[in-house]
Image (cartoon, grey):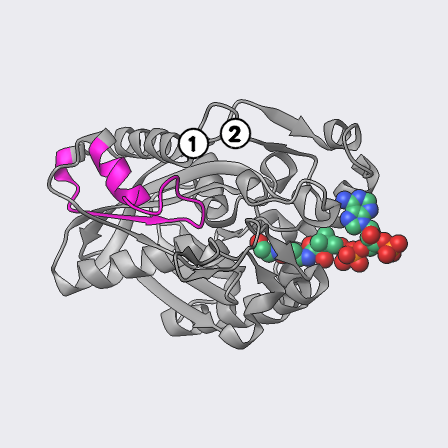
Amino acid sequence: MNIRICGTGSAIPSKRVTNDDLSKIMDTSDEWISTRTGIRARHLAETETTTSLAVTASQRALENAGVQAEEIDLIIAATATSDYVVPTLSCEVQRELGASHAVAFDLGAACSGFLFALSTAQAYIASGMYKNALVIGAEVLSKLMDWSDRSTCVLFGDGAGAVVVKADENAAFESVQGSDGAKGMVLACKNRPVVNPYHDDQEAYSHLSMDGQEVFRFAVRTVPVAIRQVLDKAGIAEDEVKYFVLHQANLRIIEAVAKRLGVPMEKFPTNMQECGNVSAASVPILLDEINRKGMIQRGDRLVLAGFGAGLTWGAAVLNW
Ligand code: UT7
């Protein structure tokens, strides 16, 4: 038994911030950001929260799938930026949707989070434990940024994407995942400091820090290998894939992956131009975009891939 994606949804904040907008408040330029990353704008939360974005994306995915919230028996939310430490984002979404028959939990794998969550849903559904799952990637990364660090804050955006997946004996799904904790500190953000009556770390809240060039090298080296592995596992050649939907960290990374795979860039849809890097949300937001534009038909083969902090990476191949 495999999963089939039967509905997609997404939500991004209404506040659109262009590179020129940022260049008015920090020492940067549209030229620097767009030539190095492809990013031209990102959407940042004002009134929206990680929960509100995740709920809207999920409602749209349920509607797109023609599935009622009560039919969902599993909710997995991938996020590094939930509004609460507890309760989890997935439980917040469950309440707002009225998905009273679901078990709900969060999963943390940074920018690979959506891929890991999808593989987890596949494993549960293949085991027969659950039948209909809601898989979410949602982030408000702007709250982790050091807005005085131009080398990171210009790269990221806020938003959420969700898919409804169902057990389908005619569906095809294969995935590979990997982690390399030894290199974790190249992309890091510390949690709250320890403060109790016996110990006080006296630290301010931490912000996201990144060794961009290390992450770049890691992505370009690892993602093509993971994609080849998952295609081999499924017995599929690159030219049988309609689209490669990759984590939207940087256009140059995607171009390098396409080149290493020998696949034309037309098969790699992108939206970092408008959304920036939305971590766990970037793959499901892009998937929703291409679905709603009518770019994918039933039976089309798609490759999804994520990579990022941990370090972590994941790739999946599925039939639409
Ligand atoms: O989702 C997680 C995955 N994350 C990624 O995939 C990120 C991967 N890495 C990258 O995308 C690139 O490494 C970056 C876009 C982050 C950086 O590009 P780069 O070509 O590696 O630039 P750099 O860090 O080497 O910086 C070059 C110069 C530096 O100035 P000096 O030291 O050469 O004078 C920086 O201070 O660019 C400067 N700089 C900026 N200038 C204008 C750094 N940030 C900015 C900025 N505006 N926003």
Q: Secondary structure at mark 2?
A: loop
Q: In percent of the image, x 55 and y 45: which residue is there?
A: 144
Q: Which mark is residue 49?
A: 1
Query: Crowding at label 2, few (<14), some or many (≥20) Cα neighbours within 10 Å?
Result: many
Disc 1: residue Cβ within 8 A of ligand 1's nearest atom: no
Residue 263's disc is: none
Image quarter for residue 287? top left
- Quadrant assignment for the N terminus: bottom left
Question: Element at badge 1?
Answer: loop
Q: In this orientation, does residue 172 appear?
A: no
**245 part of magenta stretch:** no
Does 81 lie within the magenta span? Answer: yes
Residue 183's place in the image compared with 125, above or below, is: below
Amino acid carrying label 2: it is Ala
Q: Are marks 1 and 2 in contact (CB under 8 Å)?
A: yes
Residue type of the residue flagged with mark 1: Thr
Q: Is residue 315 left or right of residue 36?
A: left
Which residue occupies the foreground of this view, 143 or 156?
143
Q: Where residue 216 sits: x, y (%)?
A: 67, 62
- Residue occupying the far bottom of the picture: 182
Whether residue 67 is situated above or below residue 121 in the rendered picture = above
Place residue 288 in its image quadrant. top left
Is 170 or 68 nearer to us in this picture? 68
The residue positioned 39% from the left and 39% from the top of the image is 83
Q: Position of residue 132 (x, y in %)?
A: 18, 46
Residue beneath disc 2: 45
307 over 78 or under it: above or below: below
Where residue 160 appears, as percent x and y from the top left, is 43, 38
Query: Which stretch did the figure color magenta?
Result: 70-95
18 sits to left or right of 4 = right
Residue depicted at x 18% and y 52%: 167
Is residue 60 in view from this perspective?
Answer: yes
